[in-house]
Image (cartoon, rainbow, N blue to C red):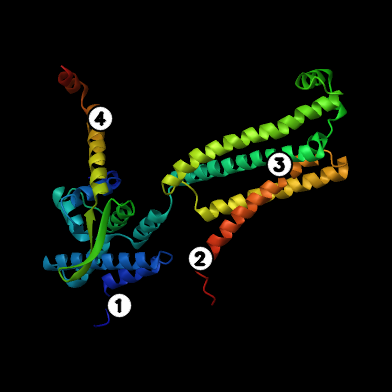
């Protein structure tokens, strides 16, 4: 096989195309080069058969094929995710992660009920401030618990129910959205962000929520004799647990990747 | 013909040509040119990214073959491609009819309505 002439317009074009393809997957580059070469040679041969001198035939074939930059840009654009599809993935992942978050809130509600049973309602909801205990507010709280010994006790009773049952109700809603959403989103491909991206976001958010709620619980111990710390301590382990689950899944996925080459 | 108006429909045109039978890029381009009596004369290199996009969408598939002494990628339409072509043809005809109705001179439109 003879070495190709460097001055050949077709060879120069193929060299330029090869250089411009940097960053494209090797298989796609080989594919594009092979198709382009076959096309350019066909066109040049057809022009030569029509009486055009060989060199000019190659020049015309290259000119008709179009600029390298435009072809490589079109190939790169092909591999790029359209903005609408990306937004759909972000929305799908947000719905799924949001519903998992709601389920976590529901679990924290169950934990709050347990802590309330162990440490009392004051441990979970804290003491109402004196400024909050207005006449109308007290009347409302007494409606919920007519046998309460004081306005503060009625407030604690009202808030403890909110802390547990509102959270549990939110969790049930989250579970319903998760069941429906997962069924729809898992059915097709491309409806969610790549799993590793979603898991990274989930780990970050749950870890931040876990650390923040644990810190608030510790703060309540330091500044309010522990009153109200149960509200935070019921949330922290659930958030941290979710962060660990997502973290393990992410770690497994990352470790399945081929090892990076060390230079 | 203003080719920038047609470029957006290159994939539809390629599907249509491929519905007549498999072909490699150069042959498909020649078929496009012949079927349009030379009116559609694309920048030839644009055909390949369009073919690759159609393959990404599983509307066509391809394999390497030795044709006339050269190794070429030969493309063929898939059942999904045939279905997509039928839908796109119908959309295109509806669009052409609608644009045509608007562009038609008013007197002619009235006469047609009668």
Q: Secondary structure at mark 4?
A: helix
Nearer the N terminus, badge 3 or badge 2? 3
For label 2, the residue is A257
For label 1, the residue is A6
Q: Secondary structure at mark 3?
A: helix
Measured in 3D between alpha carbons, the distance from the residue under mark 4 to the one under mark 2, in whole angstroms, is 53 Å
Horizontal and vertical percent position of residue B83: 24, 43
Give the label, 4 or 2, closer to the camera.
2
Front position in the image: B31 or A162:
A162
Local packing at callout 2 (Cα closer than 10 Å; few below 14, some 14-19, many 20+) is few
**Callout 3–callout 2 Cβ contact below 8 Å:** no
For label 3, the residue is A111
- Hey, which residue is sitting farthest front in the picture? A117
Horizontal and vertical percent position of residue A144: 75, 21
Give the label, 3 or 1, closer to the camera.
3
Measured in 3D between alpha carbons, the distance from the residue under mark 1 to the one under mark 2, in whole angstroms, is 41 Å
Relative horizontal placement of residue A87, taking residue A105 as reference (left or right): left
Q: Chain of mark 2?
A: A
């Amino acid at each position: 096989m003879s070495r190709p002439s460097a001055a050949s317009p077709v060879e120069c074009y193929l060299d330029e195309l090869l250089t411009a393809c940097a960053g494209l997957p090797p298989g796609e580059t080989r594919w594009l080069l092979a198709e382009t070469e076959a096309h350019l040679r066909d066109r040049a041969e057809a022009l030569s058969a029509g009486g055009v001198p060989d060199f000019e035939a190659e020049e015309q074939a290259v000119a008709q094929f179009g600029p390298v930059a435009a072809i490589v840009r079109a190939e790169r654009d092909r591999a790029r995710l359209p903005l609408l599809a990306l937004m759909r993935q972000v929305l799908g992942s947000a719905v799924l992660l949001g519903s998992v978050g709601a389920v976590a809130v529901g679990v924290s509600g169950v934990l709050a009920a347990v802590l309330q049973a162990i440490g009392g309602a004051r441990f979970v909801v804290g003491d109402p401030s004196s400024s909050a205990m207005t006449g109308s507010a007290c009347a409302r709280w007494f409606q919920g618990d007519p046998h309460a010994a004081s306005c503060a006790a009625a407030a604690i009773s009202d808030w403890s129910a909110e802390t547990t049952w509102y959270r549990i109700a939110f969790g049930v809603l989250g579970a319903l959205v998760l069941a429906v959403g997962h069924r729809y989103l898992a059915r097709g491909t491309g409806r969610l962000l790549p799993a590793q991206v979603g898991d990274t976001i989930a780990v970050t958010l749950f870890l931040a929520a876990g650390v923040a709620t644990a810190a608030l619980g510790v703060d309540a111990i330091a500044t309010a004799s522990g009153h109200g710390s149960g509200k935070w301590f019921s949330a922290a382990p659930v958030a941290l647990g979710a962060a660990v689950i997502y973290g393990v899944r992410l770690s497994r996925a990352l470790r399945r990747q081929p090892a990076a080459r060390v230079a | 013909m203003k080719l920038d108006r047609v470029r957006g429909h290159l994939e539809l045109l390629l599907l249509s040509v491929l519905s007549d039978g498999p072909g490699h890029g150069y042959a498909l381009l020649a078929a496009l040119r012949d079927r349009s009596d030379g009116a559609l004369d694309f920048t030839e290199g644009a055909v390949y990214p369009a073919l690759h996009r159609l393959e990404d969408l599983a509307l066509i598939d391809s394999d390497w073959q030795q044709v006339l002494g050269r190794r070429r990628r030969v493309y063929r339409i898939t059942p999904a491609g045939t279905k997509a072509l039928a839908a796109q043809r119908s959309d295109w005809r509806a669009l052409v009819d609608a644009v045509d109705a608007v562009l038609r001179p008013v007197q002619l439109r009235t006469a047609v309505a009668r």
